Amino acid sequence: AIVNPNRLSPTEEDNSGDGAHGSTMTLFPEEVYDRFPFMLQTLALIYLCLQLIGAICVRSPSNKVAEIEHCMIDVDGDEETCSQQKIHLPPLNSSNITEEDKEDAVAIWGALKTRTFWNLWICMVLSASAGLNVVTVYKMYGNTFDTLQDDSYLALVGGIGSIANGLGRTFWGMLQDKLGSKRPFMLLTTVQGVMMLSYPFMVHSRISFGLATFIFFLCLGGNFAMAPGICAKLFGAEAGPKVFSVLFSAFAVAAIFGTALNRRFLASYGFEFVFNFMAIVSLISAISISFLGKI
């Protein structure tokens, strides 16, 4: 509705002479593409409003009173008597921080200094870089082939891919619950690597290209789903979620620097080199995860 409010349909345009494999491309009118920056600005404003609402709703707990019910049963087990006791809960401030809390913070900082954490961090950077690469270039790559040069089709592939991203989080999470973390993650990165090598052969059919892209999105969701569980296995239920808050930086690094590196390779060597490079990166991640012990 924001990008194409007038529901304009794509049209075929002559593409001969620009280096593409086909002679025509199916594209939307220019006014649709001109509204794309406005769409990003609108989404950014919506996200900002949601974050502000969330920030306003955050409150430190006040000095509240909790009621605890105590029940006693007589020696014969016939009668039960209950009484209520009121307990005043102090507000949260720096004076409430116990020595145990301080020791917990030291333990988390120690976890971040371990080789295990950085091995896991590198695994996530490598694996996520491969998936994010396809999310970035699949449409650009598809437009270089006559069979795929349809903007509405490629947009549909991306939309279904977004659904696959969400389904992947459920699928890989359930697999992790049943098999642990190591085998599903090795399976994910191996499938990702094999699909990277196969991607150039999938472009001759819209069905095969769409299915391959669907699998990439499916695997990308699995990275986000399994990372918290791996942290909990390696660093415990208490420290694991806090360690994951730092591990999440791996996805930011993959999104920013991995994408920038891919663009540089793409400009210098072409798509196939990028896909082969990402396949190697993904398989390295599969090997690296095997050194993390029993997870």
Image (cartoon, rainbow, N blue to C red):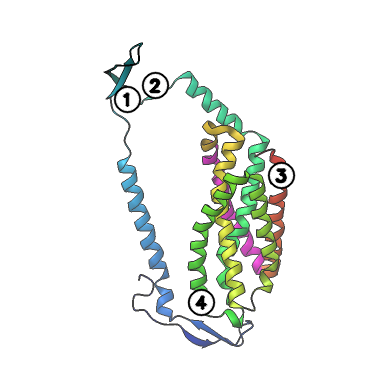
Front position in the image: 260 or 170: 170
Using the numbered discs, state the Cα–Cα distance from disc 2 to disc 1 in whole angstroms: 8 Å
Q: Amino acid at mark 3?
A: Ser
179 relative position to 95: left or right: right
Q: Which residues are magenta?
A: 243-267
> If you read the primary sequence from the N terminus, does the residue marked by circle 3 or circle 1 appear first?
1
What x and y, as percent, mark residue 156?
Answer: 49, 72
Image point 62% across, 50% down: which residue? Answer: 125
Marks 2, 4: nearer the viewer: 4
Mark 3 or mark 4: which comes first in sequence?
4
The part of the image, by quadrant, that contains residue 181 is: top right
- Badge 4 marks a residue whose secondary structure is helix
> Which residue is labeled 2 in the image?
96
Q: Which mark is residue 290?
A: 3
Give the crowd class for mark 1: few <14, some 14-19, many >=20 residues within 10 Å: few
Whether residue 249 is in magenta: the answer is yes
